[in-house]
Image (tube, rainbow, N blue to C red):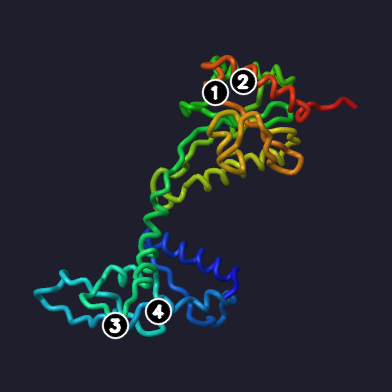
């Protein structure tokens, strides 16, 4: 298999493991189906029970259930040689450990245990929690942290500070609220099987997609990322230095700034913001014809 096929194979293994963790089985065709769309070659070449390296000695003879032992014995799923199995069956085979396994080597056990523990590691990834307000001031997009989760009010000290910053930058001090003024709150899903999939990568993709939509809707010279969460999920990577520019799209830069609450608590930060603003303000200044 080529490197691309190996990568797609690993992605399919992870996908099946996640579906198994949600209580669903996935079965793949062994051969091309009649009147069906062509299957990818790497799917038809799915690893068999031999390639998983589970020897026939591991298979146990399942006795007929008796009236005394019904419900107490745990039996392995029936698997024939060369048959493709689901992730659920692989996990069941990994759990059942006969007393004597002379033909099973240590690397085989390690590979099966790694597959069994993979869904747990995926589910253990923490879900980020934040609320962001999206605004537009002239040709600038603003993405601002909301520590309390509530939308800006006209008399809020942090909103008054934001208006002062816009005025100092030569922009309008009456920014327009986007998304009907509704904050972007993460996680979006509070319950359900897909709740655990709302990791940092999904949050970053969602925030950047929304910014891209607004950036394409109207001419944009710069995107202000105000606050730790706005910088983290509005940038392309976790680590983004304050007061620096990161490319967002062709001809559009993202400017990282501290949170409004930090500026209110530490007024000396206004000096750093002003110095950075003087350096980068050409991004949003419109030249008169």
Q: Secondary structure at mark 4?
A: loop
Mark earlier in primary sequence (2, 4): 4
Q: Nearer the viewer, residue 186 or 238?
A: 238
In this view of the protein, can residue 182 be seen by the observer?
A: no
Query: Which residue position is annotated with label 3?
Result: 57
Quadrant housing the C terminus:
top right
- Marks 1 and 3 sit apart, C-alpha to C-alpha, by 67 Å
- Marks 2 and 4 sit apart, C-alpha to C-alpha, by 62 Å
Asked whether disc 2 touches disc 1, contact meaning CB atoms under 8 Å apart, the reply is yes
Other residues around mark 3 within 10 Å, as few (<14) / some (14–19) / many (≥20): few
- Marks 3 and 2 sit apart, C-alpha to C-alpha, by 70 Å
- Depth check, mark 1 against mark 4: the one in front is 4
Q: Nearer the viewer, residue 166 or 275?
A: 275
At x 58% / y 41%, what residue is drawn?
A: 207
At x 61% / y 40%, what residue is drawn?
A: 235
Query: Which residue position is annotated with label 2?
Result: 162
Mark earlier in primary sequence (4, 3): 4
Task: Indicate left or right for 153 with 281 as reference.
Answer: left
Query: Which residue position is annotated with label 4?
Result: 49
Query: Which residue position is annotated with label 1?
Result: 152
Asked whether disc 1 touches disc 3, contact meaning CB atoms under 8 Å apart, the reply is no
Mark earlier in primary sequence (1, 3): 3
- Depth check, mark 4 against mark 3: the one in front is 3
At x 43% / y 73%, what residue is drawn?
A: 27
Q: Nearer the viewer, residue 99 or 151?
A: 99
């Amino acid at each position: 298999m080529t490197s691309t096929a190996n990568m797609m194979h690993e992605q399919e293994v992870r996908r099946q493991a996640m579906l198994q963790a949600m209580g669903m089985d996935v079965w793949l065709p062994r051969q091309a189906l009649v009147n069906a769309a062509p299957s990818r070659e790497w799917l038809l070449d799915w690893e068999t029970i031999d390639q998983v390296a589970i020897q026939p000695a591991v298979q146990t003879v399942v006795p007929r259930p008796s009236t005394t032992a019904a419900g107490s014995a745990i039996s392995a799923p029936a698997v024939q040689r060369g048959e493709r199995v689901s992730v659920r069956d692989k996990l069941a085979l990994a759990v059942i450990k006969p007393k004597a396994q002379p033909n099973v080597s240590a690397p085989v056990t390690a590979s099966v245990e790694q597959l069994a523990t993979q869904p747990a590691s995926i589910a253990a990834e923490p879900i980020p929690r934040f609320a962001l307000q999206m605004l537009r001031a002239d040709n600038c997009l603003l993405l601002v942290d909301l520590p309390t989760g509530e939308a800006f009010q006209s008399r809020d000290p942090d909103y008054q500070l934001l208006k002062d910053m816009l005025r100092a930058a030569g922009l309008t001090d009456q920014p327009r609220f986007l998304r009907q003024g509704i904050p972007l709150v993460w996680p979006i899903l509070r319950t359900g099987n897909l709740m655990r999939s709302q990791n940092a990568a999904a949050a970053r993709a969602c925030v950047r997609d929304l910014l891209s939509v607004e950036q394409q809707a109207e001419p944009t010279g710069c995107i202000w990322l105000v606050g730790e969460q706005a910088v983290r999920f509005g940038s392309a990577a976790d680590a983004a230095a304050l007061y620096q520019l990161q490319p967002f799209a062709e001809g559009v830069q993202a400017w990282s700034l501290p949170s409004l609450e930090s500026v209110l608590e530490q007024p000396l930060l206004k000096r750093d913001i002003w110095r950075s603003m003087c350096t980068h303000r050409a991004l949003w200044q419109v030249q008169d014809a």
